[in-house]
Image (tube, helix red, strand yellow):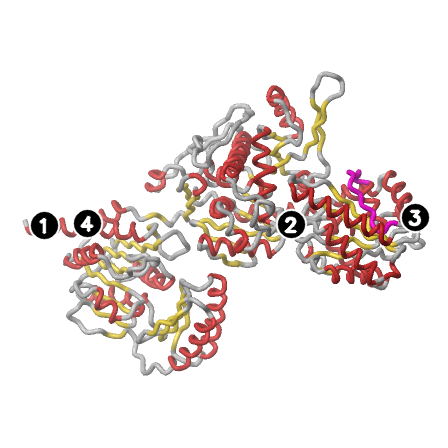
Amino acid sequence: MVSRSYSNLLDLASGDSPNFGRVRGRMPRVMTVPGIISELNDENSDKVGSDAASSVSQERIIIVGNQLPIRAHRRSNGDGGWYFSWDEDSLLLQLKDGLGEDVEVIYVGCLKEEIEPSEQDNVSQTLLKTFKCLPAFIAPELFSKFYHKFCKQQLWPLFHYMLPLSPDLGGRFDRSLWHAYVSVNKIFADKVMEVISPDDDFVWVHDYHLMVLPTFLRKRFNTVKLGFFLHSPFPSSEIYRTLPVRDELLRALLNADLIGFHTFDYARHFLSCCSRMLGLAYQSKRGYIGLEYYGRTVSIKILPVGIHMGQLRSVLNLPETESRVAVLQDQFKGQMVLLGVDDMDIFKGISLKLLAMEQLLVQHPDWRGKVVLVQIANPARGRGRDVEEVQSETYSIAKRINERFGRPGYNPVVLIDTPLQSYERIAYYVIAECCLITAVRDGMNLIPYEYIICRQGNEKLDHTLQVLDPSAPKKSMIVLSEFIGCSPSLSGAIRVNPWNIDAVAEAMDSALVVAESEKQLRHEKHYRYVSTHDVGYWAQSFLQDLQRTCKDHERRRCWGIGFGLGFRVIALDPNFKKLLVEHIVSAYKRTKNRAILLDYDGTMMPKTSINITPSPENINILNSLCRDPKNVVFLVSGRDKKTLTEWFSSCKKLGIAAEHGYFMRPNQDEEWETCVPVVDFDWKQIAEPVMQLYTEATDGSSIETKESALVWHYQYADPDFGSCQAKELLDHLESVLANEPVSVKSGQHIVEVKPQGVSKGVVAENLLATMREKGMLPDFVLCIGDDRSDEDMFEVITSAKEGPALSPVAEVFACTVGQKPSKAKYYLEDTTEIVRMLQGLATASDQAERNNAS
């Protein structure tokens, strides 16, 4: 169906909403797009429809992941066909339990098995009809570049804090691999397009394999309801900023409505990257963290994923599990089992764990013959030399330990590197006294959660383990790396720095000797959390937040701007419009008493400009406006009166309000006046030393001293530290100046102290009152500004429409610079558009002057 998103700028400008009817589409088709597609060439970017039928009887969510939760099997009957089954271990399948029976779920992703092109249509139809799964078929060569090379050798190491300092350490950035990554994301977007009803469906994208997918979807449907969850760590800005496509990935993620992370650390790193690289600030509103991005609020979700309790308990109930537990209990009779379960990769810290085991046996010889470390090493998901090195080191250390401390019938390290059935792995959980997870960096890691549930056990296992009192509290111990996503949620674990071998060895010893009652208390605390925060709870919470974030999509007016991966959507409140030059010039020409109030920095002059003096073009525009007898023009700035006098000396008729309105002058022939009486400025002697203290402690900050005010600037300081210091300074100044007649306010990269009653709003009030007294009842008011201080002017002129200060037919234009929350009803993008609009007004005045002269 066709989206309600606004794709036609002319429709938006006119304020009319295009009327799209519901379109019954064709049957979903299956397409395979081979080769590499450049991110700059999106021939379908102007499409606003899909081929899916739009009649939906229930809420629907499309879950997109790199792999479908499906197992494919070749038939053995000779016809060479396929049959399929659900992959019960897949997180994407497990999360369905938290979405409710009334939510229809459709999956989009790849199959693990390679399907021949001639079979792809049949496989797609079967999966869509039987499992509601839509497979994305990627050519093997393209998939290898996308997954094994870009995802696993470039993104994955970097997201785990590994810099590609040499070709052997991670993968050096390769632009062709990046193009492959974008191409695969584009194919996934095309697949979503085949089934989506954009005004009704929610889309939930998973993990770093599909980080640019939000841009492709947002480009098709401006108001798509889109969530993204990152299952890996997100690195600090110092690590992430080394990625050559860092901005493209950040902007792509910001095209989602909700972005989820396992821990606050990962979310904080992402927010810091957005601040440092894109200049975006975040706010916490009633417990929700939000980023304002071109009028849209992108919400940040922090919630670790959980495990599927039902599936785990069903495996615990299997007879195979019970018999396997009995075998292991007999095998390790008289010994205490420490258990590690990790993938064989460079970040899981297996070799560090083995070294700690060796250190334990050296420092505590009493444990020799009594303690066994069972290390289950799952096959690595990636490929490369680093995996081979990890394997070689692991085997070497395990062999050394066993040769040094082993004896007949006892090996201190049991290394299992062959694939295990679920019940076999769970049997090891059941008999393990302690679980050791010593990864040096890991996104979440659910192994400790599984261990806790397995240690809780059931009646059958209690009988197998010969538990005398089944009602007695269960016990478990966990030694856990502090660099893992689940670490914050397991407060009863012994947290360790895995790099500190001695500390890990001592933690292992502590876990073995801790009192039984302590083990029970720790286990009870962990079990209570894990059993209530399962994967269903996680999925339900994410969907609820996504619904909350998207609830106002229908009432917002949106359109897209930008090319390639720089695409983004501007979303505006229905009452917040772009100020069209033709509209305001038309109103300007038909009115007779006009009040014009203009800010300077950030409005007529970009704040990033090195040369901050007014340009000849700006001077000419102001003089043209001031020459018009129908106009009263005021420049309202925070700068001091000396600077403004020098800059605008050639503008004889220009009214100037300096220092946010404390000093005012109607034109050059008049004297400066103050808006409020101030007896003294003794408060400066209190405020300035405090500001000086923060200036010395904050590199890049400075103090601006005005006649009426003191301003602390931190535009050139570190964004995070500067913002933190500004908040502290604000509190400090409010405390020490509590009994002084001043106000302390924060603005864009500033903290300002000024006399009470001074604001730009006072300038607007005085100007309107003066014009009314002179018999010039304003029928046209234009006010333009970019900062928080300008909001006072917007409020005054907007509320004046209801009072006697303006003509009953007055046209009021309060205009802010950029799309952001404001009391203004209009906006223009930047200073270039502001100057262009003012030039249009000036040209109209010059034309009227020439007509009168003739």
| Front residue of this view, candidates 793 and 770 | 793
Question: Which of pointers 3 and 1 lies earlier in the amino acid sequence?
Answer: 3
**Rendered image quadrant of residue 97:** top right
Q: Is residue 602 above or below residue 59?
A: below
**Residue 95 showing in the rendered view:** yes
State the residue at coordinates (62%, 34%): 107
Query: Contact, CB < 8 Å: mark 3 with mark 1?
Result: no
Secondary structure, mark 1, is helix
Give neighbour class at mark 2: few <14, some 14-19, many 20+ (Cα, 10 Å): many
State the residue at coordinates (85%, 53%): 404
Between marks 3 and 2 in the image, the one whose residue lies nearer the viewer: 3
| Front residue of this view, candidates 647 and 381 | 381
Where residue 727 is drawn, which disc sits there?
none
Residue pointed to by mark 2: 443
Give neighbour class at mark 3: few <14, some 14-19, many 20+ (Cα, 10 Å): few
Q: Position of residue 235 (x, y in %)?
A: 57, 52
Give neighbour class at mark 4: few <14, some 14-19, many 20+ (Cα, 10 Å): few
Image-based side of 410 in relation to 61, left or right: right
Mark-to-mark CA distance, 1 and 2: 71 Å
- Magenta span includes 832: no
The segment highlighted magenta reads 411-423
Q: Position of residue 450 (x, y in %)?
A: 76, 48
Residue pointed to by mark 1: 850
**Rendered image quadrant of residue 206:** top right
Image-based side of 233 in relation to 414, left or right: left
Question: Which of pointers 1 and 4 lies earlier in the amino acid sequence?
Answer: 4
Query: Contact, CB < 8 Å: mark 1 with mark 4?
Result: no
Question: Which of pointers 3 and 2 lies earlier in the amino acid sequence?
Answer: 3
Three-letter amino acid code at the position of disc 4:
Arg
Mark-to-mark CA distance, 3 and 2: 38 Å
| Front residue of this view, candidates 29 and 150 | 150
Question: Which of pointers 2 and 4 lies earlier in the amino acid sequence?
Answer: 2
